[in-house]
Image: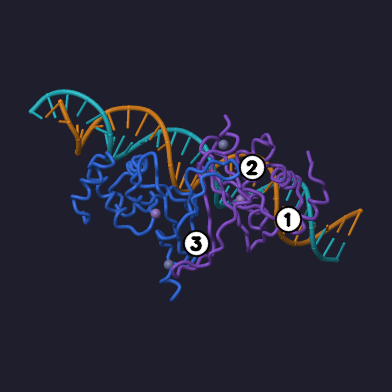
Chain colours: A blue, B purple, C cyan, D orange
Amino acid sequence: MIMVNNKLIDVTFKKYGLRKTSFRKNLFELFHNSSNTLSAKEISSKFSSSADKVSIYRALESFEKSGLIHKVPDKNNLLRYSLCKSECRPNKHAHDHAHFLCSVCEETFCLDDFTLPSTKSHNGFLINDLKIIMEGTCVSCKSI
Amino acid sequence: MIMVNNKLIDVTFKKYGLRKTSFRKNLFELFHNSSNTLSAKEISSKFSSSADKVSIYRALESFEKSGLIHKVPDKNNLLRYSLCKSECRPNKHAHDHAHFLCSVCEETFCLDDFTLPSTKSHNGFLINDLKIIMEGTCVSCKSI
DNA sequence: TATTAAACGCAACTGAATTGCGTTAAAATT
DNA sequence: AATTTTAACGCAATTCAGTTGCGTTTAATA
Ligand SMILES: [Mn+2]
Ligand SMILES: [Mn+2]
Ligand SMILES: [Zn+2]
Ligand SMILES: [Zn+2]
């Protein structure tokens, strides 16, 4: 099942201070090979119930705290996560890109070249983090 | 308890096709007099348990469908709503503003004067809806 | 190899949100 | 004004994402 090479796992887990348990390695791989964002339920189904849901939630929390993944807003208010860019750290998630949700195929796309406004404050509100979430029709679904 | 004049209630409820029950009139008033957004729990406490939570949820759903209120993001993934601008209709919620989540008080604020980019496409992606969600410290929490 | 500390897995729990259904009240019709 | 119709109400029961407790296993380390 491991398609991501072990070197990358070693480097990544060392960098983020994570234990290399078989489940967490597989979970990392799942994120790494997913173009779309993931909910706990989706993760569970990918593991075909071989992973306990509590382990999933705790791993997600741990990954998020380390700066490996970040929360993404979800239409149905579920917890949903996506792999971070390599610049992310526990104290600073660098979400310097917009996310696009296709209403047709339900895929999520990272629009890396969509530059975010770099505003740091607005009317006295101090902005630490800014997310842009788009909804619409993706390139491939448009032409169907 | 009614501070919003009855004329406004009449006009608004007619405009949005809503029944004038005493609870829903009070709920509308609550939204009208609130500077910040509201969750079901917060609404419940304002009514000091005189309104059933099911009625609250159903009223919120009904208000939202009519275009009177809109969902806003919440720090703890709760359902949270805010009064819409007068331009909103069932089929077209004009969410032309950004939302701000305070990490300290966990409130959500509508930044009505932070207008969203009106981009309709990007690299072939057709954008129907665009959301900006900011996180940071709100005005009041900043000065504590 | 032994120690220790984090991760796992199972069951039980929590709490926001939903559903069912009989009752009440607003609006429409007569 | 009285009747019919239909939406809203209220209570109980349910659902389900997410959490907590705790004993066991496994990875890191010494
Ligand atoms: Mn992303
Ligand atoms: Mn708003
Ligand atoms: Zn698509
Ligand atoms: Zn605040």
Image position of B110 with respect to B129: above or below: above
Category of crowding for the residue at label 1, using alpha-carbon neighbours closer than 10 angstroms: few (below 14), some (14–19), many (at least 20): some
Pick the front one: A39 or A97 = A97
**Residue A76's x, y, as percent?**
49, 52
Residue B53 is situated, as x and y percent measured from the top left of the image, at: 62, 42
- On the same chain, marks 3 and 2? The answer is no
**For disc 2, does the CB lie below 8 Å from ligand 4?**
no
Amino acid type at image mark 3: Glu
Label 1 sits on a secondary structure element that is loop
* Mark with earlier residue (1, 2): 1
- Direction from residue B70 to residue A5 in the image, left or right: left
Task: List the residue tagged with mark 1.
Answer: B18
Secondary structure of the residue carrying tag 3 is: strand
Residue where numbered disc 3 is placed: A135
The Cα atoms of the two marked residues, 3 and 1, are separated by: 29 Å
For the C terminus of chain B, which image quadrant? top right
- Tell me where residue B124 sits by quadrant: bottom left
Chain designation of label 2? B
Which chain does the numbered disc 1 sit on?
A: B
Callout 3–callout 2 Cβ contact below 8 Å = no
Image quadrant in which you'd find residue B1? top right
User: Local crowd at mark 3 within 10 Å, few (<14), some, or many (≥20)?
Assistant: many
Q: Tell me: D22 left or right of A100.
A: left
Determine the chain carrying the residue at label 3.
Answer: A
